[in-house]
Image (spheres, coloured by chain):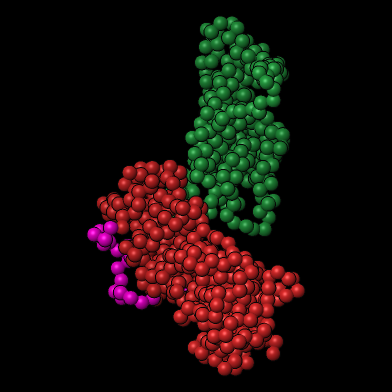
Chain colours: A red, B green
Amino acid sequence: MTPRMKLESGDVHVSWAPDRKEKAGVAASVRGLSKRFKKARVLEDVSFDVAEGESLVLLGASGSGKTTILRIMAGLEQPDTGSVILHGKDVTDLPARERGVGVIFQAYALFPRMTVEKNIAYGLKIRHRPRKERRETVDRLIELVQLQQHRKKYPWQLSGGQQQRVAIARTLAYKPQVLLFDEPFGALDAQTRVHLRREIRALLRQVKVPSVFITHDQEEALELGDRIAVLNNGNLEQVGTPDEVYNHPATEYVATFLGAANLLLGVVTRGSVEIGTARLPAEKETRRFRDGQSVKLVFRPEDVCLSPDANLIEGCRRLANGVIEEVSFVGSYERLNVRLDLAHRQQSGDLAPVYQVTINTPERMTGVPIMATRPKPEANATKYKPGDRVAVGLTSFSVLPNYTLARQR
Amino acid sequence: MKITAIRHVRGFDVARPVSIGVMLGIMLPLVFLPLLSIFIYGTSKGLGTFWSSLIAPEAIFALKLSMVTSFWATVFNVIFGLFAAYVLSRYDFWGRNAVIVTISLPTAIPTAVAGFALLLLWGPYGTLGRLLNPQGAQLMFTPYAIILANIFVTFPLAFGVIKPVFDTMSQSLEEASATIGATRWQTFWHVTLPSLRGAIVSGALLTFARAVGEFGSTILVSGNLALRTQTAPLYIFAKFNEGQIEAANAIAIVLALLSFVIFSVLFFARDWLEFEAREA
């Protein structure tokens, strides 16, 4: 078992952030970054801020431009347009070594010929700091990352997690303005990954250095980020807290990239969304749309509620009737494929549902498939089997404008 | 390195002793016997004769001259090879590939032609030698000419060893150093150079071994003057022509042992030299 980083609340607090006057405020920001590689557009007018002490996760698929943003912030790449501002100072034209940012590279990039101690002391050594200061800083940092018994070892003698801690300590030594993590857990196995990201989260709370992570792993993003910035093809789709981007995705891409999502096309009609013949009351959600506007209804599988009769639970808005098509256990929860009947006019709420779709006869399989998940207790309380008829409702959903249709009009 | 072979038969595999025997049998007349004969004839008239031909002033001088000229050629080629490898792996420019090919060319040119070319350039009536002459300076037929010839013929060796290491070196090490705040020079000194240690040592040993044995170009540019510009291989050739086989052989033994030591170091120190490969 690798020793854990020290997280006890009784620890003496040492801030590894540079001493600054203003306590809160913006630590780092990028303004209107654009970048092209030959003909390919990599970044398109990307802007965001990182607050003091905050951790921001840049989330995107490979090729979304997240690595390029990180390299531009570090000074390893130049943007075509736009600027990088660190603590109020425009550093766009400064070379990497004058920016004072800490980069934790994907493979850590520890110096192979230097011991753990020497790796950590490197930043102070090249700054020609006195020997005494160097030794004290190294001692404190080695204790912070719990590598006391490894200080004389070389990088190749350490595990991946230990190497990462050395890499973090090496940057903290010179009090970086901001820490940049390039896919920090990419090279580790799944278990270590979960364990390490909790450690890093706790460590960052302790050292209070603003950080930017890049990752393609949505689970990692939700856990590591105070805020998440979702990138798609060089465009920033949404920046928000994990709760905001997960529960209130601003775009279809954000909805589908962060976890599973069901998507139905509909039209806004007098305070509700009309999907086929179904009508979902959505006074609040449709307020920003006008009547007749084409929209997309987005909802997560766990926000679907089912009932064998017409009585849906409190707070669950009736969407349509449906037929259970498939039931499968996926470890911690149950997954159901449901076919919605959206082609036939529903009766009002308290009447028994009329089912027009079946899963048995192909010619009548006209329903729209959606996915629902239920936690185990609920799955055990009411069991469903394929062919069961259910009323389907939603506890939470988002209504997004349907730009594809809007353009056609 | 672990040595293994796939099992093809049950029990005793006759292929093993046979293949080893064939290999050694072929090497015997081609490599082992010629080497052995140097030692046999070199000491055939007794160790006393061997020793006295070894400590003959001309012999000592020739060995020393070979060491010194090879040493300086090695120093130059390692430093330049390092520099050229850095430039050619970090910067792209028009004609870069042409330069890489040209650097490797001296190994393909017959060494006698190399010496001839140097004479044409630096000789008393050569293109550049003419410019030296009015000042009474003379480059050819001096130890400097030998260093020049050694530099030319061993030019690609150190470069050839160092360049691939540069190419495969992870760029992120240097990037990490830069983001930590190091200047270009600090990064080179603390990060890049230590990773090249193995390549530099093996490049230097190869260059030195090759330079000590150089004959073709040296005989043309040095003038082959005993006690002035006669290197060890030239001494061997001269003594052989004079019929003093023992004297020639004594020095040959020294040179053979020297290269044996150098290549042993290269072979057995490989693990130490390739230390950085574990990280990459």
Q: Relative to residue A4, is residue A363 depicted above or below?
A: below
- Magenta region: which residues? A8-32
Q: Identify the residue at image location x=52%, y=20%.
A: B60
Between A10 and B25, the one nearer to me in the picture: A10
Question: In the image, B224: left or right of A153?
Answer: right
Q: Quadrant of residue B224?
A: top right
> Residue A109: percent from the left, percent from the top?
47, 52
Between B228 and B180, the one nearer to me in the picture: B180
Q: Identify the residue at image location x=39%, y=52%.
A: A166
Determine if residue A276 is in view: yes
> Residue A21: percent from the left, percent from the top?
29, 74
Q: Identify the residue at image location x=41%, y=66%.
A: A211
> Residue A117: percent from the left, percent from the top?
35, 48
> Residue A351: percent from the left, percent from the top?
57, 85
Between B142 and A394, the one nearer to me in the picture: A394
Q: Relative to residue A336, is residue A186 depicted above or below?
A: above
Q: Relative to residue A56, is residue B55 depicted above or below?
A: above
Name the outermost residue toward the front. A352
Q: Is residue B216 magenta?
A: no
Secondary structure mostly seen in magenta is loop
